[in-house]
Amino acid sequence: MNYKRKSWQEKLKDKKGLPKILELKENFPCYKALHKMGVKSGDRVVLVNPREVIEVMKQVPLGKLVTIVEVCKKIAENNGVKGCCSLTTGIFIMTAANAVEEAANEGKDLSIPYWRTLKVDGFLNAKYPGGEEAHKKHLEDEGHMITIQRKRYRVANFESKLFKN
């Protein structure tokens, strides 16, 4: 059997059946994260499509940042629901980052400033291409100050730089 591994760009394409609106249940993998964001069991939530995540990421201008929480809130708002699955959102954020780097190696520009998307509480994403060091360099190149907290990189005063759209 011949199997060809999908490229990051292929993985970023819309998924059949998504977005999908569901009622949040306690057995959902993203239940705890959604609950921390104020979403309750029984509330309607959305399982996102990669395109929705990319659209939010592309809107973040130079000098501004978002966290996965802001991405999820915007997607939930766009879909008229209380929350957005942070697990699938996080996967698509990481997929977008890898797709951008893959495309760049092929001489293409996907125009997704993925490095402006942080983890919760302003921490850098070790799953981005090149890890935290490459993420740190992108952010420092844009003028952001990076600190170390709990042995991890974090953007200093990231709250003041959050993009509100």
Image (cartoon, helix red, strand yellow):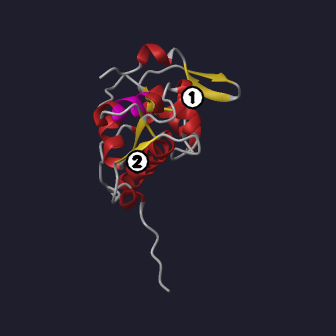
Residue at horizontal 44%, vertical 35%?
Answer: 115
- Image height check: is 142 above or below 6? above
Residue at horizontal 40%, vertical 59%?
Answer: 11
- The quarter of the picture where residue 124 lies is top right
Q: Find residue 104 and report its horizontal and vertical position in percent.
A: 36, 52
- Tags 1 and 2 in contact by the CB under 8 Å rule? no
Instruction: Give left or right: position of 54 versus 87.
Output: left
Give the magenta range. Answer: 70-76
Q: Find residue 87 and report its horizontal and vertical position in percent.
A: 51, 44
- Image height check: is 5 above or below 118? below
Q: Secondary structure at mark 1?
A: loop
Residue 136 visible in this rendered orientation of the protein: no
Q: In the rendered image, which quarter contains the C terminus?
A: top left
Nearest to the observer: residue 122 or residue 142: 122
- Image height check: is 101 above or below 4? above
Q: Is residue 71 magenta?
A: yes
Q: Amino acid at mark 1?
A: Phe
Q: Amino acid at mark 2?
A: Ala
Which numbered disc covers residue 143? none
Q: Find residue 43 and report its horizontal and vertical position in percent.
A: 44, 34
Q: Is residue 60 magenta?
A: no
Q: On the image, numbered disc 2 is attached to which residue?
A: 96
**Number of residues whose C-alpha sits closer than 10 Å to that of mark 2, classed few (under 14), some (14–19) or many (20 or more):** many
Q: Secondary structure at mark 2?
A: helix
- The quarter of the picture where residue 112 lies is top left
Q: On the image, numbered disc 1 is attached to which residue?
A: 123
Nearest to the observer: residue 29 or residue 74: 29
Residue 125 visible in this rendered orientation of the protein: yes
Nearest to the observer: residue 141 or residue 126: 126
